[in-house]
Amino acid sequence: MQRGLQEGGWKRLNSLFNDPPHTTKEIFEPQAYFEKQPLPKVSLPHPAPLAGIPGLNFLAENIMGELGYYAVLGQLISEDEAKSVATGWLADRYLLYERAAARPSPGLTQEGKMYALVSQTRWSSPEAALAFFRDYHSILARKYPELAPDKRSTTDLFIGTAANGQVILLRKGDACLWAEGIPAAQSEAMLNWLNSR
């Protein structure tokens, strides 16, 4: 609002109410709004490897936006890291699934449910994506203290096993893709699916 007043007075400020920002990036970074910088869109189809899992139900599809990643990084890494990395966010989409567990396990919620998450993000550069990849790898280690890495892990790929299933985190250029809570039997197919995106 301040920038609208500075650049065009009351007329420009009124236009903000008729055409408000559409993303939190446009709020955090007003130049993205005023310069009408186009942001990419991320489409994330339902992964074929999850299609035949008995009891797996789709719950939600949404985006987190720059604010969402700023909050995640700020709470789980540091405020300085959030300020540094989250500004590189361009687009994201996630899919959330739920299934009842066959037996109690430390990785379950109190209701005995297990969750699978599939997500894709786009960043302003391969370096920004790598910074996020490293941060999210640290977050996964905190989220799943029992997380055991797989020997196939590299600088751009992390595969691990947690109590609720397999975790795969992949960086491809300016994108990061990941899946959490994947049954071991679908792990290789999920890795191939993520690689094909």
Image (cartoon, rainbow, N blue to C red):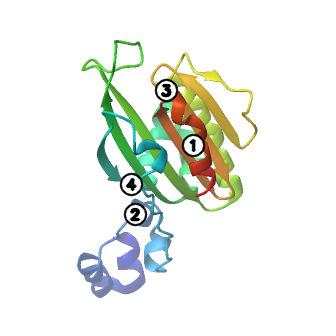
Q: Is residue 85 above or below residue 36?
A: above
- Disc 4 and disc 1 in contact, CB within 8 angstroms: no
Could you say which is closer to the camera, residue 62 or residue 87? 62
| Residue 108 image offset from top left, x and y in percent | 36, 19
- Are the residues at dot 4 and dot 3 in contact (C-beta closer than 8 Å)? no
First of labels 2, 4 by sequence position: 2
Report the residue at 35% width, 54% height from top: 62
Distance of mark 1 from mark 3, alpha carbons? 14 Å
User: What is the three-letter code of the residue carrying label 3?
Assistant: Gly
User: Which element is circle 1 on?
Assistant: helix
Horizontally, is 158 left or right of 155 in the view?
left
Tag in front: 1 or 3? 1
Label of residue 165 in the image: 3
**Image quadrant occupied by the N terminus:** bottom left
Residue 17: image location, x then y, percent? 24, 76
Task: Please say if the residues under marks 1 and 3 sit with CB atoms less than 8 Å apart.
Answer: no
Q: CA distance from mark 2 to mark 4?
A: 16 Å
Disc 2 on helix, strand or loop?
helix
Q: Residues within 10 Å of mark 4 (few under 14, many from 20)?
A: some
The answer to which of marks 4 and 1 sits earlier in the sequence is 4
Look at discs 2 and 1 and give the one toward the viewer: 1
Disc 1 designates what residue?
189
Report the residue marked by disc 4.
Answer: 63
Disc 2 versus disc 1: distance between alpha carbons? 39 Å
Nearer-N-terminus badge (1/3): 3
Specify the amino acid type for callout 2: Ile
Q: Which residue is mark 2?
A: 27
**What distance separates the C-alpha of mark 4 from that of mark 3?**
23 Å
Residue 159: image location, x then y, percent: 64, 33
- Which of pointers 3 and 2 indicates the residue nearer the eye? 3
- What separation in Å lies between label 3 and label 2 (alpha carbons)? 37 Å
Q: Amino acid at mark 4?
A: Ile
